[in-house]
Image (cartoon, grey):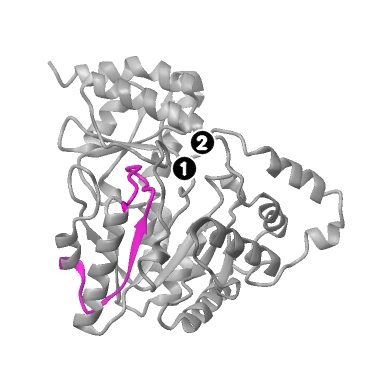
Amino acid sequence: MFPEKTMAWGKARSCIRELAEYGWKRKAEIGAENVYDFSLGNPSIPAPDCVNEAIADLIRGDSVALHGYTTAAGLPSLRQRIAADYKERFGVELDPDRMYVTCGAAAGLAISLRALLMPGEEVVALAPFFPEYRVFVEAAGGVLVTAPPAMPDFQPDFAALAACLTEKTKAIVVNSPNNPSGVVLTEESLRKLADTLRSHEKKTGNAVYLICDEPYRELVYDGVEVPSVFRYYDDTILCYSFSKSLSIPGERIGYVAVGPKAKDGAEIYAGILGAGRALGYVNPPSLFQRVIERCLGATADVSKYRENRDLLLGALREMGYECVEPQGAFYLFVKAPEADAKAFSERAKRHELLLVPSDDFGVKGYVRIAYCVSKDMISRSLPAFRALMAEYRI
């Protein structure tokens, strides 16, 4: 006998990976240039020069020290640099001794949830959300509760959120800029969110921890800013990844930071250390810890994503598609011309368009388009999008 739930996660891949696997097979059959693959959020622009320069310089040094273990929580010098950089940018002073360097934001989320949750406790996710949240929560013994968004701007629906909060609620996960919608939570929304959680705590006596998943923090457009949630709510845990800002997703490097004023912050951090140990997330890659230390503050050329967004958004709206206005990340959330997003996604495959249906994101009737692809592919895909929409106008 083996754990049934674990086997189920392995047998049923995420909707994103399932479509990506189909795309790789289809490209082998008819040629990559004939498949318009918008499935994966895989950065398509190069890492900034400082990344390769840092790697080249570091590998010329002491190989034993470079590839050896660091402390379990990550290099103290790196954590100090991250804290100093965050204070300079956001005016919030993080404690390097309550910071844990991780193998990306996914590891950070898994560790944080394991540190917080007792069996059966609930975690609210603001929809739409990254489908793996459900796996992370359930693996930690919790129950995921979906809070639907307000339409059409996809900011939180606070009445719906309040209805989701119970005496079992332990945490809420927010992702801004959002995958899959590209929406950025406004300052007003963050204030209302903080007020809602404080009101719940006052009513029940139970603190609700806010877990912020921010791998797209630097990918924003048109002067939009991503506020620091620590400014609005003390009981916050930040999960960050350098995958998107530095275009190094395969290197799996990020961090968790427990808010300096978080209730029971020392205990939570001890739980994070313990969860990292229990899950095997001890000592993230030492080479890339040192690379990040040298590249803090740098970003890849995200203007390329803005160009892709503007091209695709303008063309699809002209064709009659309804699209959520994305202020960040590199995803376009498009309303399917029929109620069943999975059926629409299957129909799109006939035109070699790979669009991720929204059901597993906690919202029905939409598809996610990852526009972190070449501008040329977007241009070549437009006739296929036009032909697809024409089928709904017959």
Task: Give the class, few, some or many, for how many residues have Cα within 10 Å of label 2's Cα (few <14, many ≥20).
Answer: many
Q: Judge from the rendering whether residue 49 lies leftward or rightward of residue 16; answer left or right.
A: right
The quadrant in which the N terminus is found is bottom left
The numbered mark at residue 168 is none
Q: Are marks 2 and 1 in contact (CB under 8 Å)?
A: yes
Q: Which element is circle 2 on?
A: loop
Vertical comparison of 173 with 337: above or below:
below
The residue carrying mark 2 is 302
Q: Judge from the rendering whether residue 60 lies leftward or rightward of residue 314; answer left or right.
A: right
Under mark 1, the amino acid is Leu
The residue carrying mark 1 is 219
In percent of width and height, residue 255 lies at: 55, 62
Q: Judge from the rendering whether residue 141 lies leftward or rightward of residue 335; answer left or right.
A: right
Q: Taking the image as drawn, is residue 31 in sight?
A: no
- The disc, 2 or 1, on the residue closer to the chain's N-terminal end is 1
In percent of width and height, residue 356 lies at: 33, 38
Report the label total: 2
Q: Residue at x 52, y 45 (%)?
A: 244
Q: Quadrant of residue 195?
A: bottom left
Q: Quadrant of residue 99?
A: bottom right
Q: Residue at x 38, y 26 (%)?
A: 310
In percent of width and height, residue 309 lies at: 39, 30
Vertical comparison of 69 with 40: above or below:
below
Q: Taking the image as drawn, is residue 63 in sight?
A: yes
Q: Judge from the rendering whether residue 217 lies leftward or rightward of residue 321; answer left or right.
A: right
Q: Which element is circle 1 on?
A: loop
Q: Residue at x 45, y 39 (%)?
A: 40
Look at the image and give the residue range highlighted in magenta: 163-186
